Amino acid sequence: MAEKRSLWGSKIGFLLAAIGSAVGLGNIWRFSYMAYENGGGAFLIPYLVALLCAGVPLMILEYSLGHREKASPPLAFARINPLWEPLGWWMPVVAFFGINLFYAAVIGWCINYFGLSLTLGWGTDTQSFFFGEFLQLSDSPFTLGGIRWPVLAATAGAWAICWTICYREVSRGIEKASMIFMPLLVILTLILVGWSLRLDGAREAIREFYLKADLSKIALNTAEGRKVWVAAFGQIFFTLSLGFGIMITYASYLPKKTDITGNALTTCILNCLYSIIAGFAVFGTIGFMANAKGVPFDEAITSGPGLAFVVYPEAINQLPILNQLFGALFFLVLIVAGISSMISLTEAFSCSICDKFVISRQKATTIICSLGLIGSIPFTTRAGLLILDIADHFINNYALIIGGILECILIGWLLKSQVMRRHVNNSGGIRLWPVWDICIRVITPAVLLIMLVGALLEDFTRAYGAYPIKALLLFGGGILFVTRLLSFILSHVPWRPEKLKTKHHPEDENLLT
Ligand code: PHE
């Protein structure tokens, strides 16, 4: 008997969930810092080019694959070519074990900081508070130094929220949560942006450092300029949650008649718009702080966790009024953005498990979230930040890019992109132009390959972050190896025959022969 697959209750529900996955911690701190580093407003040029020639084509690819096969990544890959199944597993396995485990710990930090903001409990020296008192950071990734209990407690809280939502399945859980989270996120972000723009020194900083375009930084005839382009492509991939099979999973719950191209365009545009708007809040707030403390802007801005947990608390301290409220608002924005991405990372894995094994969604969710909590524990130790930094670097530079290249080869060459384009056009909505075939078969994989080679050259000439090589091999290479091994093992469990049976696509026949 064919089992019934969950469906989204509404078109907007699906869109909000997909945007919820895309809009995450990366939109808030990663985008702003990258824009600042890479030529301010000029960064928008490579960013938008990357969006058009890699982001949108790949989003359409992931949506159409999930929609056509109505399957999780491993099943969709296996149906196209059984030899590719391990690679189909690798995406959700990396999403879960590679990203979700530390993503949960970072949300745990945000929850702690939300609490701290109510009393400005981080004190006046926010840098030593974060690294010293709060994380009690050890000096080597090998010195775990015991668990930081407040971090573990909040991380467990993040997993509990994620479990509660995923347990209720797609339309009653993820869709309902997204219907609440996304409007809430938009409202909170707009308040934050409006408030930030009114701070002294904010507008000048935005004008000078965010909007002013330094075109020399993106010149393709300089090595520095080319790096900016590579960085822009990397950011587009990360921010759109591409290469992890998440969008394949979410699209597998779509009804037969769906505007795939339109949905992909909407997701991409709204996600990038969110980043650009959030950039006003980040640049404005840091500009205010630099102004208040009389330090230059480039000394005030930092990347990654430092931006949210050191610079922002410092800026909050400097506010003339309502500091606590501003702080709570900022960390709430991070928590909501983070949880909706965490849900998608969990869902991609649990959907894959449920496709292959005879297990109920509820049971799978409970087991997966419990495993997730246990797996997050290393990230809540005193070495957590260091392990996280290494894992993040290797996953973003390798797993995600390799995933993207393989998707392009599978759909562009093995299935043939015309077959998929025809499926998209038969499903209704905006027509997909043949130029998509060129992107998927040539442009996108070529650019990704350049990025991959660039990352390899960089890693082989210089140890990332000056960490000991052993640590890089264990926490970076180790994660890549273990996730590959696990994918290989999972792909050797046989499918139930009714699952693997290729869905009949009569429309493909004349194209495939
Ligand atoms: N897109 C999310 C962000 O910008 C990160 C993410 C990557 C989430 C991959 C899910 C999967 O923060």
Image (cartoon, helix red, strand yellow):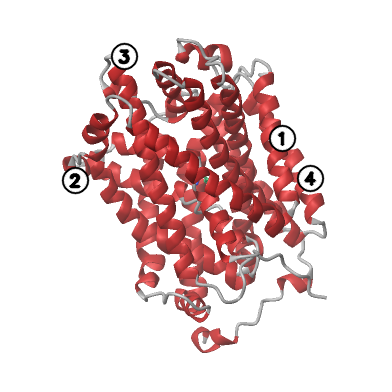
Residue that numbered label 3 is attached to: 293
Residue farthest along the bottom direction in this orientation: 510
Inspect the image, locate mark 4, and give the three-letter code of the amino acid beneath it: Thr
Comparing labels 3 and 4, the label whose residue is closer to the camera:
3
Q: Is mark 3 within 8 Å of ligand 1?
A: no
Q: Which mark is residue 219?
A: 2
User: Alpha-carbon distance for marks 2 and 4?
Assistant: 51 Å
Residue that numbered label 1 is attached to: 373
Look at the picture and state if 148 lies above or below 456.
above
Q: Are marks 1 and 3 in contact (CB under 8 Å)?
A: no
> Looking at the image, which residue is at 48% across and 36% down?
393
> Looking at the image, which residue is at 60% across and 48% down?
180
Q: Nearer the viewer, residue 22 or 61?
A: 22
Inspect the image, locate mark 3, and give the three-letter code of the amino acid beneath it: Lys
> Looking at the image, which residue is at 39% across and 16% down?
318
Look at the picture and state if 32 lies above or below 200.
below
Comparing labels 2 and 1, the label whose residue is closer to the camera:
1
- Residue 31 location in percent, x, y? 38, 40
* Label 3 vs 4, first from the N-terminus: 3
* Label 2 vs 1, first from the N-terminus: 2
User: Alpha-carbon distance for marks 4 and 1?
Assistant: 11 Å
- In this rendering, would 285 be left or right of 505? left
Q: Nearer the viewer, residue 378 or 115?
A: 115
- Residue 242 location in percent, x, y? 49, 53
Q: Are marks 3 and 4 in contact (CB under 8 Å)?
A: no
Inspect the image, locate mark 1, and give the three-letter code of the amino acid beneath it: Leu
